[in-house]
Amino acid sequence: MKIIHIANFYGPKSGGIKTTLHNLGTEYGKIGHDFIYVVPGKKFSRENTTHGACITLPSWVIPFSGGYRVIKSNRQVKTIVQSLNPDRIEVSDRFTLSCLGNWAKKRNIPAIVFSHETLRGLVKNYFGIPLKSFVSWHNTRLAGRFDFVVTTTHFAAAEFDEIGTSNVVRVPLGVDLETFSPAHRNEELRAKMIKGGEVLLVHCGRLSPEKKPERSLQVLRELLSRGINARLVYIGSGPLHKKLYDSSRDIPVTFWGYVANKNLLAQMIASADVSLAPGPIETFCLAALESLASGTPVVASETSAVGEFLTQDNGDFVGLTAANNGAAFADAVQIILDEIKEDPTLSDRCRLQAEKFPWSATIYKLDTMHPVKAA
C-alpha cells in the first residue's frame, strides 16, 4: 500500500511532528508499505530517507514561531499527491490542510487526519475563553471531511466525543525503545550537566508559549528555596528562549538548545533524576514517554494527557501530575526524589511502562483502519 502523509509545522528543529513522521515511515516500511511524507521546506525537493521518500514544497516561515513552516500552496499539494496515486493519505494539520479530506473523498482515496492538539485547549490558551460553539463547529466540520480522526489519548478525543463524533479512533503514539533506555545513563555526561548540583531536572521540549516552559523555572526556584541543590537543563529551542534565559541568570539553569543527535539526547534524559512536562494542553507528549523509556520519572501538568500513562496497571506510579504552578510541581518532584531513594525499582518500572507503547502497536492500529482504495 502506498501511503502519503502530508504535514505542516515540520522543520529541522521541530520535535513531535518530525519524530512521529519518521517513526511512522520506518514502521510502515517494515510491513511492506511505501511511505512518502510531504512537508514544508525552502524549495521543492525529493530525497529517499530511511523513513521513506521525503518531498518538500515551498513554504512560508511562521513569524515568531522559531522557524516553523507552512506549505504555501495547497493546490501544489493536491497536484503532487494526485500524481503519486496513493492508496491512502494521512494529514497532520487540522487547520491549513483540512481541505484535503473532501478532495480525497471525491477521488475515492481513504483519508485520515491526526488531531495532534486539543482545539479547546489552544483557544482557551490564546484567547482566555473557551469559545465552545466555535470549537464544536470546527471539530464537526473536520470529522465530516475525513474517514477517521485519529486521537492519541482519551484527553485528545474528549472534545470530539462530547459532540457525538462517530469516526474518532484512539491510536496512542509510540516510543523508540532501542534509542531510549536506562542503559544509556552516562555518569560523565551527568556530571557535566549537573555542574556540582545534587538533583538534575530536564525539560525536553519546544520553548513556545502553549507549552509553558517558564513553569520549569518556577519549579527550580521553589526547590532551591526549600534547600534542594537542583539544576535545570532545557533541551530544546523556541521563541521563548531569550525571555527564559534573561529571567534565569540568577539560578542554576543550562540551555542546551536543540539536540539533533538522538544518542546524545537519550543519554541526557537517562542521566537525569526527573523530567518535567509542564505543558497544560499536551495531547500525548512524546518527550514524556521517551523519559519513561529512559528510566526517568516524569512530573506533568494535571490538565494534560500525560497522566494517562503515568500509572501502572497495579496502581504504582512512574510519575506524577501536578497543578499548574511551581509549588505544586515542586511538591511532586520531592515525592519522586523520595521514591527514588526508597525504591530502587522505580527506573525499571518507568521502562516497563514505556514498553507498552512500541511504534509497532501504533502501526498495527493504523494499518487496520482502511481498506485499499477501490480500483
Image (spheres, helix red, strand yellow):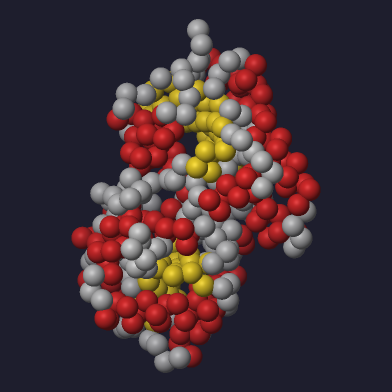
Q: Position of residue 77 (x, y in %)?
A: 60, 25
Residue 11 appearing in the image: no
Q: Position of residue 120 (x, y in %)?
A: 68, 53
Q: Residue furthest front?
A: 314
Q: Quadrant of residue 268?
A: bottom left
Q: Position of residue 36 (x, y in %)?
A: 44, 27
343 versus 51 height, above or below: below
144 lies left or right of 365: right
Rendered residue at 48%/90% (across/down): 225
Q: Position of residue 21 (x, y in %)?
A: 44, 38
Rendered residue at 68%/60% (across/down): 125
164 versus 248 height, above or below: above
Q: Quadrant of the N terminus?
A: top left
307 versus 98 height, above or below: below
228 lies left or right of 188: right
Q: Quadrant of residue 115?
A: top right
136 lies left or right of 48: right
Rendered residue at 34%/34% (across/down): 27
Residue 327 appearing in the image: yes
- In the image, 371 versus 241, the foreground residue is 371
Q: Quadrant of residue 201?
A: bottom left
Q: How many marks?
A: 0
326 versus 140 height, above or below: below
- In the image, 140 versus 255, the foreground residue is 140
Rendered residue at 54%/67% (across/down): 302
- In the image, 353 versus 278, the foreground residue is 353
